[in-house]
Amino acid sequence: MSSYSHCQKVAHKLWRLTQKRTFPKIYTILDAARDEVIYGKLVTSDIEKACLYQGKQAIELADVAPHLVRLWQGDSFTKWLLNNGWGNSWGIFLESSATLNELRQHFRKFTIVQDEEGTPLYFRYYDPRVLRNYLPTCNKDELQILFGPVSHYYVEGEDSNSMINYSFDEGRLTQNVVQVTTSPNSLA
């Protein structure tokens, strides 16, 4: 009897077969401000990636900026990320058929928001602790905008033993908690 490591269990949940019997395109938005090793790994890895900031801001804040990354099942970067980042609130995961550039354009719209007085603020929606509290407060129109080309958002649960899968179907937010713990009796 074989068992999955924690990392393999999370990957198995992300890359499940779709109804069309294909594997989904999975991306992550990583918050480089969460740990200095994130940016270093982004720079040295041969991966499809894009900073969500642009211009001067992208240059000056690159080491603490949010970065969108296309993930591949079984890839060394993906394994590194799941082994080191899962449970540490390094970012969110998402499923989309869109390209990296299309997703970058979509997510750039949300990096800066304004408070009631019109003061611009950074919105750290790519922190799983923020997104899992924010999504349930959104109305239908806000959800439609936030989901856009995204079919699913995946975030760590309050502990690293669960993953929350959010989808927006028929005008409603659906939230499904999936256990990703590893035990001898729980193979997925």
Image: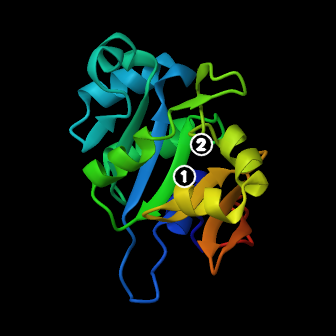
Q: Is the residue 27 above or below the residue 85 in the image?
A: below
Of residue 125 and residue 4, the one placed in the foreground of this image is 125
Q: CA distance from mark 1 to mark 2?
A: 8 Å
Is 54 on the left-hand or right-hand side of 117?
left
Residue designated by label 1: 7
Q: In terms of depth relative to the viewer, which is nearer, 178 or 132?
A: 132
Q: Which residue is rendered at x = 40% and y = 17% of the image? A: 63
Q: Which residue is mark 2?
A: 86
Q: Amino acid at mark 2?
A: Trp
Q: Are marks 1 and 2 in contact (CB under 8 Å)?
A: yes
Q: Secondary structure at mark 2?
A: loop
> At x 30% / y 53%, what residue is drawn?
102
Q: Residue furthest left?
A: 46
> Which of the 4 quarters of the picture holds residue 136?
bottom right
The circle on residue 148 is none
Say above or below: 102 vs 2: above
Left or right: where 173 falls relative to 81: right
Horizontal and vertical percent position of residue 19: 46, 89
Residue 112 % position (x, y): 52, 29
Q: Could you tell me which residue is drawn at 65 percent across and 75 percent down?
A: 171
Instruction: State which quarter of the image contains the C terminus.
Output: bottom right
Q: Is residue 98 above or below residue 91?
A: below
For this view, does 12 lie left or right of residue 132?
left
* Foreground residue among 141 and 185: 141
Residue 144: percent from the left, percent from the top?
57, 63
